[in-house]
Amino acid sequence: MIFTILTLFPDIFHSPLQESIIKKAFDKGLVNFNIINIRDFAADVHKTCDDRPYGGGPGMVMKIEPIYRAMELVESIYGRPRYVLLTPQGRPFDQATAERYGKLAHICLICGRYEGVDERIVGCVDEEVSIGDYVLSGGEIPALVLIDAVSRNIPGVLGNEGSVADESFKEPLLEYPQYTRPEVFMDMEVPAVLLSGNHEEIRKWRRKEAIRKTLLKRPDLIDKLAPTEEDGKFIREIMEEFPE
Ligand code: 6GU
């Protein structure tokens, strides 16, 4: 899968994309990155990419023409990718979106700055995406968040294919608690069942503790769970531990 990134700050991308899972995916040829500096497509000698807003007011607005010329170059090489604008006004990015993007051959991420991009960009892109209800200075960090979440859904990127489905948010449950050595740390013991070697008991414990964690920390997610009979039993048992 190709990720093309249009940005005014290309340097932000270099180190995060050269570590860990994404680096391994790149080395395996599963992902590739084109990081394009929008400034290279500015028309004037000053390489102007933003300007004052029509109608007045504070801040600067990103000009559309340099972005559009960068898009034309991308299309002349690859054909039309899926264009996604990173903006606080976009649809909330979630796991379902990450999985959908993971099936694309080529996605082009356009990083807006916080003050905004000329509204006419909206007619040029396929989707607008936000990573949450808080203010960031630009779309670069959101683009990295999206690349990480999407890459994990490309077959072969995670060594263990089971990891994708196993983790939080495939099902609307938080992950069960994990432990590794030592068995005792500052008087805190690893739950005995995990040392028992009884795989069925371990499975049941993990399922119940995932439900417990979700009930405590993210009760909103439990509403989205389609509980099995066993899940229902675990939920009742957990609730009975909290009289009131
Ligand atoms: Cl995509 N961009 C900016 N500038 N701020 C954000 C965002 C995006 N998502 C959440 N906050």
Image (tube, grey):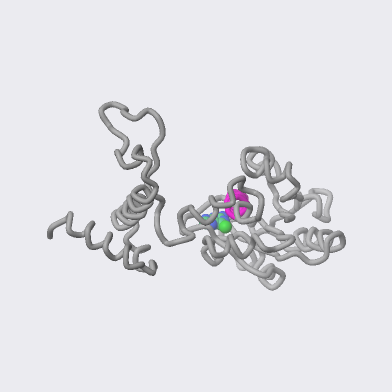
Q: Residue at x 36, y 67 (%)?
A: 228
Q: Is residue 15 magenta?
A: no
Q: Is residue 241 left or right of residue 176?
A: left
Toward the viewer: 232 or 19?
Answer: 232
The quadrant of the image that shows the C terminus is bottom left
Residue 40 visible, this orientation: yes
Q: Is residue 143 magenta?
A: yes
| Residue 81: quarter of image | bottom right
Q: Is residue 81 left or right of residue 222?
A: right
Q: Which residues are magenta?
A: 139-149
The quadrant of the image that shows the N terminus is bottom right
Q: Residue furthest right?
A: 76
Location of residue 46 in the rendering, given as x and y in whole percent from the top left corner: 79, 48
Toward the viewer: 72 or 186?
Answer: 186
Q: Examine the residues drawn in magenta and state their main secondary structure.
A: helix
Toward the viewer: 192 or 145?
Answer: 192
Q: Residue at x 34, y 39 (%)?
A: 196
Location of residue 215 in the rendering, given as x and y in whole percent from the top left corner: 30, 58
Q: Residue at x 42, y 61 (%)?
A: 172
Q: Residue at x 58, y 60 (%)?
A: 98
Residue 113 visible, this orientation: no
| Residue 108: quarter of image | bottom right
Total number of numbered discs in the rendering: 0
Q: Is residue 226 left or right of residue 146?
A: left
Q: Residue furthest left?
A: 244
Instruction: Answer with the quadrant where ligand 1 appears in the image.
Output: bottom right
Location of residue 133 in the rendering, given as x and y in whole percent from the top left corner: 46, 59
Reply above or below: 203 against 193: below
| Residue 235: quarter of image | bottom left
Location of residue 214 in the rendering, given as x and y in whole percent from the top left corner: 34, 56
